[in-house]
Image (cartoon, helix red, strand yellow):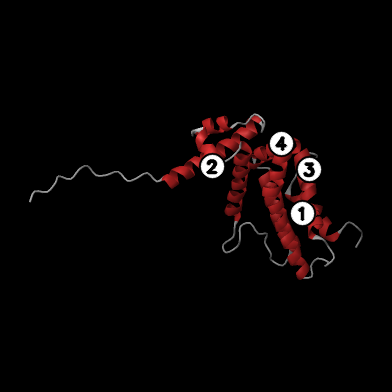
């Protein structure tokens, strides 16, 4: 019996997951670049789509607004930074808990200084922070999706220190963390003075040990 001639080899089906991830990454990069270059108000879905090389319908399929795109892109940027500095076997988003509270806080705040001075993080971060001051919805989302989860990590670490007897049991962690986090944010946002490792180390020392004579 004659065999039917084999046709040309079939091409493998396109990997839609890989294509989607590539498009998503391009959209993240385009959104962060644009908001840094022209500001939040002048950043548009159309502009992001053109920069990323995708149709705007692709963006609307995944996100409801440019604010949603930018916040997700910014969160992804933070996740990438956490993954780069993660130690094996440890949650990349958790603060270190070596038993030395001062050393752990200084380590994390030094990493924060690195991020705040990195243009990839600094430019979109300033644009989103500025927009959050005048755009209540963006401000609320920025706090809920980015700031509060980050601050909760400090709360968790301070509570661990309380259990270990390194922090007084009557201290409220959510207030205590502002002794070193808020001054850093204020100095960076308003550019009142340079930020550095020495600066955040001093913030931790002042916060943990006070400024009264010992």
Circle 4 residue: 131
Q: CA distance from mark 3 to mark 2?
A: 36 Å
Residue 71: x, y in percent?
63, 43
Q: CA distance from mark 4 to mark 3?
A: 18 Å
Of labels 4 and 3, earlier in sequence is: 4
Between disc 4 and disc 2, the foreground one is 2
Q: CA distance from mark 4 to mark 2?
A: 22 Å
As drawn, 78 above or below 55: below
Between disc 3 and disc 1, the foreground one is 3
Circle 2 residue: 62
Of labels 4 and 2, earlier in sequence is: 2
Asked whether residue 103 is in view, the answer is no
Q: CA distance from mark 1 to mark 4?
A: 30 Å
Within 10 Å of disc 2 (Cα), the crowding (few <14, some 14-19, many 20+) is: few
Circle 3 residue: 187
Q: CA distance from mark 1 to mark 2?
A: 42 Å
Circle 1 residue: 201
């Amino acid at each position: 019996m004659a065999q039917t001639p084999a046709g040309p080899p079939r091409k493998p089906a396109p990997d839609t997951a890989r294509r989607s991830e590539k498009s998503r990454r391009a959209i993240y990069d385009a959104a962060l670049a644009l908001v840094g270059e022209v500001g939040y108000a002048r950043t548009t879905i159309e502009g992001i789509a053109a920069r990323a090389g995708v149709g705007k319908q692709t963006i609307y399929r995944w996100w409801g607004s440019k604010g949603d795109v930018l916040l997700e892109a910014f969160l992804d940027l933070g996740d990438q930074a956490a993954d780069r500095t993660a130690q094996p076997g440890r949650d990349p988003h958790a603060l270190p808990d070596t038993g030395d509270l001062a050393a752990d806080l200084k380590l994390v705040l030094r990493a924060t200084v690195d991020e705040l001075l990195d243009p990839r993080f600094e430019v979109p971060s300033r644009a989103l922070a500025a927009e959050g001051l005048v755009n209540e919805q963006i401000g609320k989302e920025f706090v809920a999706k980015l700031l509060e989860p980050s601050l909760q990590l400090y709360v968790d670490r301070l509570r661990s220190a309380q259990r270990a007897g390194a922090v007084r049991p009557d201290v409220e962690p959510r207030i205590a963390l502002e002794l070193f986090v808020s001054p850093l944010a204020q100095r960076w946002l308003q550019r009142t003075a340079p930020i550095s490792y020495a600066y955040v180390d001093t913030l931790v020392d002042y916060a943990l040990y006070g400024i009264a004579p010992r």
